[in-house]
Image (cartoon, grey):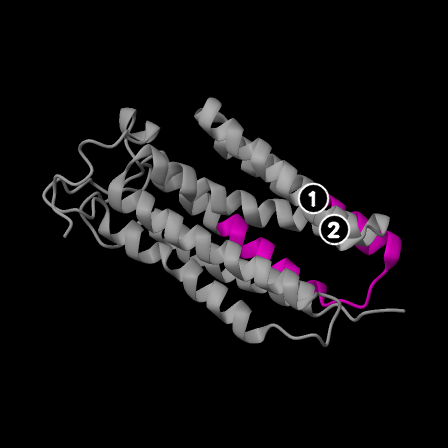
Amino acid sequence: MLTPNTWESWKPATCLKTGCFCEASDTQSPIRQAANTYSSLAFVFSGVFIFAYARKRNRLSVGYSFLMGLSSIIVGVGSAFYHASLTFIGQFFDVFGMFLLAVFAMVYAWERIYKFQPCTTLTLYLILNIFLSWLQIAIPDTRRYAFAIVLVIALLFEYYFRVKNKPQIDVRLLSVGVGLLAGAYIIWMLDNTRIICFENSLLQGHAIWHLLGAVSTWFLYRYYASEIATI
């Protein structure tokens, strides 16, 4: 049974020094930030939808679909734990899930460009995520920059793949996904800098970031699943 004192003995998240986004921390509840906690679960629904939609009728394998779905679920559970507890380990798993998705996007682009075998792709995926996990423990303030760098690199390689290989794929789905993520990031910035901030409201900019990010993940998956396999 969780109590309001459950997290007091845990190492606190680094954000507590400056404030963990706009939503006020409720020290009288085991769920410190209710809106940010519950909205995180949108990523869990996104992952479940990916599992349900996974098919072998396109280039994206069922295994990779499972990996994307699982990564999205880890984002949701990790983010919910982070905002509920505002602990360092919660912070780790929040960003860990984000790395899982961004690194997948990067190495999957590499596989299609350089004709990697899946074992090579998965090895790179594992190595990069181990390194990024170490980085966010050793130098936690770099975690957001590292995520942004990996995501930008992934999108650049994906663009290069489309130019080079000219695949049969629905680019509109990626455009919608990136557009949603860009809008979500603007809202994230406004919330994090407290330019738009209502501390005790259930309407939180960071919660909107979660919702739009989860929908963006779904569109990214649908984009990959739209690619027609070629012999």
User: Extreme right residue here?
Assistant: 231
The answer to whether residue 117 is magenta is no
At horizontal 51% and vertical 46% (from top left) the residue drawn is: 98
| SS assignment at label 1 | helix
Question: How far across and down, in percent of the image, does residue 35 sit?
Answer: 26, 53
Give the left or right position of residue 180, taking residue 231 as reference: left
Tell me if residue 170 is in the magenta stretch: yes
**Would residue 127 be visible to someone looking at this image?**
yes
Q: Position of residue 140 (x, y in %)?
A: 44, 26
Q: Which residue corresponds to the image point at 65% horizontal and 50% vertical from the top-left?
A: 105
Locate the C terminus by quadrant.
Answer: bottom right
The answer to whether residue 139 is visible is no
Q: Mark 2 is on which residue type?
A: Cys
Range shown magenta: 156-183
Relative to 160, 141 lies left or right: left
> Which element type, helix, strand or loop, lies under badge 2?
helix
In front here: 217 or 10?
A: 10
Q: Residues within 10 Å of mark 1 (few under 14, many from 20)?
A: few
Seen at 23% across and 54% down, the residue is 202
Residue to which mark 2 is pinned: 119
Image coords of residue 199 (percent x, y): 21, 43
Question: Local crowd at mark 2 within 10 Å, few (<14), some, or many (≥20)?
Answer: few
- The answer to the question of whether label 1 and label 2 lie on touching residues, with beta carbons closer than 8 A, is yes
Three-letter amino acid code at the position of disc 1: Thr
Q: Is 159 left, or right, of 72 in this rendering?
A: right
Q: Is residue 165 above or below residue 90?
A: below
Q: How many marks on residues?
A: 2
